[in-house]
Each structure stands twice: as C-alpha cells, then as structure tokens.
Image: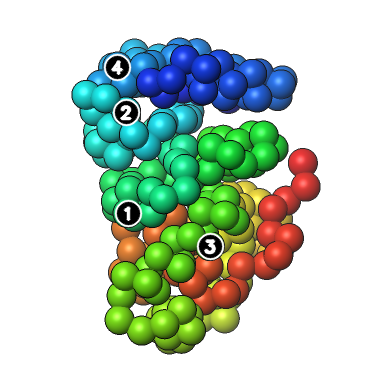
Amino acid sequence: MIRVLIADDEPMIRAGVRAVLSADPDVTVVAEAADGHEAVGLVQRHRPQVAVLDIRMPKVNGIEAAAEIRRTVPATGVVILTTFGEDDYILQALGGGAAGFLIKSGEPEELIAGVRAVADGAAYLSPKVAARVVAHLAASSAGTLAGRRGAARKRIDALTAREREVLAFLGGGLSNGQIARRLHVVEGTVKAHVSSILARLAVDNRAAAAVVAHEAGIVPAQASEQR
C-alpha cells in the first residue's frame, strides 16, 4: 500500500486529488494539509511514501516544504502540483529535491502514475511539464530550443551507450526495477548506472537528469511500463 499525504490550500483541490488517488486500491491518503508548514509536520508524523504538494501555498510554499521534507524525511518522495505559467517555480523545485511534477489540469491517470513512480523511487515529469521546462530553459537562456537540444546531446555524449539507455527510461518515469526488467539486468546494475549518470551530468537528482533526457529528445514515446 502506498501511503500519501496531500497538501493544498484549496479544500476542493484536496478533495479532488483524494478522490483520484482513492480510486487506486494500492493507494491510501493518510493525511491532508492546508499549507507547507503543516505538510512538513504531518510528513514527519505519518512518514508517507509520497507527499503531493501544491507549488503555491501560504506560510511555507511547496518548494520550501519539498526541501525540508527531503532534509528531514528523505524516504518520502515529493510530487509537485503546478499550473501553467509557473515554470520558474518548477525549476526551483527541481533544485529543491522534488521527484515528480504534474499539471493540475492533467489527466487523473497521470496523477496516479506519478505517485506510483515516485513511490518506486523514480522521477516523474508529466509530458506537459517536461515540454514547458525545456521550452522555458531555451527561452530564458542564450540560444534557441534547437541550441538547448544540441547542448543536451553533447552532455549525454559523455555517457556510455548503456547509460544513455538508462537515462532515456529514467526520463520516462521508470524506476530502477522497471528499467532492470526492460534491459534484462539486475536492479543493482541499474542503480550503479544511475549514480554514474548523475555524476557525469553533474546533476543532483533523478528529476534533473530526466530534464536533460527530455532536452536531448531521447525519451521513448511509450516509456512507461504497463501495469
């Protein structure tokens, strides 16, 4: 059973997220919070596998809450809920240790897929979030979108062929175990590849590596494993 905490300052949003997650028999919502400060306290008390946080909340926002959860309860993965127009916040949350990013207006199935992926230790960027992050990086940096893609591909040139395969699946939201099954290797081998990928790309976490995979255009169209 995947234990989940929900944090959003809008009661109707919390109720909607709870309803979607409750439709999955493998997920149980153990607590709800109305702001980031309350969310951190409830995570410390209930120790859920996943915390689903709105990016904008009073007192302590989702970015700050994600960083504090990562510091105090590192076993809890964080999924950030965002809306269009919050690209800068998403980039900050990537640096703060969030593992999943979903658009509030996305399909219910995406929420469940994101929670499951993060519970499995994977990173999950919804396709809409990934596209916006890549476009935003191009718009806010020197060069065009094509330039960003070229730069990302140069970065992944430092990886071995196997590491590029692993990175592509990682970008698609697969966990180490799922990648191992796809590549017919043991999970420990994938874990070693992921550690090497993070070091070679000079990124701190799987979500940041997933952004590089999307920038480079190597994520398979149907990367997610059927359940």
Closest to the observer, 190 or 6: 6
Q: Amino acid at mark 2?
A: Met
Residue in the image at 36% along x and 17% along y: 34
Measured Cα–Cα span from mark 4 to mark 2: 11 Å
Residue in the image at 57% along x and 81% along y: 161
- Packing grade of label 4 (10 A; few <14, some 14-19, many >=20) is some
State which tag comes first along the sequence, 4 or 3. Answer: 4
Q: Nearer the viewer, mark 1 or mark 4?
A: 1
Q: Amino acid at mark 1?
A: Asp
Q: In this figure, which residue is indicated by the disc labeled 4?
A: 38
Instruction: Say above or below: 188 vs 200.
Output: above
Q: Nearer the viewer, mark 4 or mark 2?
A: 2
Q: In this figure, which residue is indicated by the disc labeled 3?
A: 131
Dot 3 falls on a residue whose secondary structure is helix
Closest to the observer, 68 or 108: 108
Q: Quadrant of the C terminus?
A: top right
- Packing grade of label 1 (10 A; few <14, some 14-19, many >=20) is few
Instruction: Say above or below: 77 vs 191.
Output: above
Q: Is residue 196 visible?
A: no
Q: Nearer the viewer, mark 4 or mark 3?
A: 3
Residue extending furthest toward the right: 226
- The percent position of residue 174, horizontal first and vertical second, equals 61, 52
Dot 2 falls on a residue whose secondary structure is loop
Q: Amino acid at mark 3?
A: Ala
Instruction: Say above or below: 66 vs 46.
Output: below
Q: Is residue 33 visible?
A: yes
Q: Does 89 sit left or right of 193 as displayed? A: left
Q: Quadrant of the N terminus?
A: top right
State which tag comes first along the sequence, 1 or 3. Answer: 1
Q: In this figure, which residue is indicated by the disc labeled 2?
A: 57
